[in-house]
Image (cartoon, grey):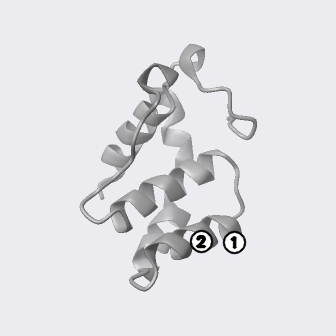
Amino acid sequence: IPEDKICAALAALLDKRNHPILIHCNKGKHRTGCLVGCLRKLQHWSYTSIFDEYRRFSHPKSRSMDQQFIELFDASKVWDLVDPEYLPNWPTLNR
């Protein structure tokens, strides 16, 4: 998934005016897993927790390249696209 698409999707997720919101792709595993993994990174989850959640829902077809994408994703790029006024009130979400 191109990084700019992930950033745009995360910006949409982080705008409470879009809630409730459903995240899904063709099979609900790899692209969805990457997006949610990047969201968890923004929520300051540990890599262990992010990858555990990813594998739990993508098994038996987990991909190491998806986990690498999540690890290398620069979450700081998302904040330029987000209006702080509309951030959801999630306890672990902050810059």
Helix, strand or loop at label 2? It is helix
- Quadrant where the N terminus is found in the figure: bottom left
Q: Nearer the viewer, residue 73 or 64?
A: 64
In the rendered structure, find residue 48 and report the number of the disc placed on it.
Answer: 1
Q: Say which residue appears at 38% left-offset and 67% top-offset.
A: 29
Q: How many marks?
A: 2
**Left or right side of 3 for 76:** right
How far is mark 1 from mark 2, CA to CA? 5 Å
Q: Farthest residue toward the top?
A: 85
Q: Farthest residue toward the right?
A: 91
> Mark 2 belongs to which amino acid?
Phe
**Left or right side of 16 for 21:** left
> Mark 1 belongs to which amino acid?
Thr
- Quadrant where the C terminus is found in the figure: top right
**Left or right side of 75 for 34:** left
Q: Say which residue appears at 36% left-offset and 37% top-offset.
A: 8
Residue 67 horizontal/vertical position (percent): 50, 72
Which corner quadrant of the image does residue 76 belong to? top right
Residue that numbered label 2 is attached to: 51
Residue 72 horizontal/vertical position (percent): 51, 63
Kindly indicate whether the residue at mark 2 contacts the one at mark 1 (C-beta within 8 angstroms): yes
Q: Nearer the viewer, residue 3 or 33?
A: 33
**Category of crowding for the residue at label 1, using alpha-carbon neighbours closer than 10 angstroms: few (below 14), some (14–19), many (at least 20):** few
**Left or right side of 25 for 34:** right
**Category of crowding for the residue at label 2, using alpha-carbon neighbours closer than 10 angstroms: few (below 14), some (14–19), many (at least 20):** many
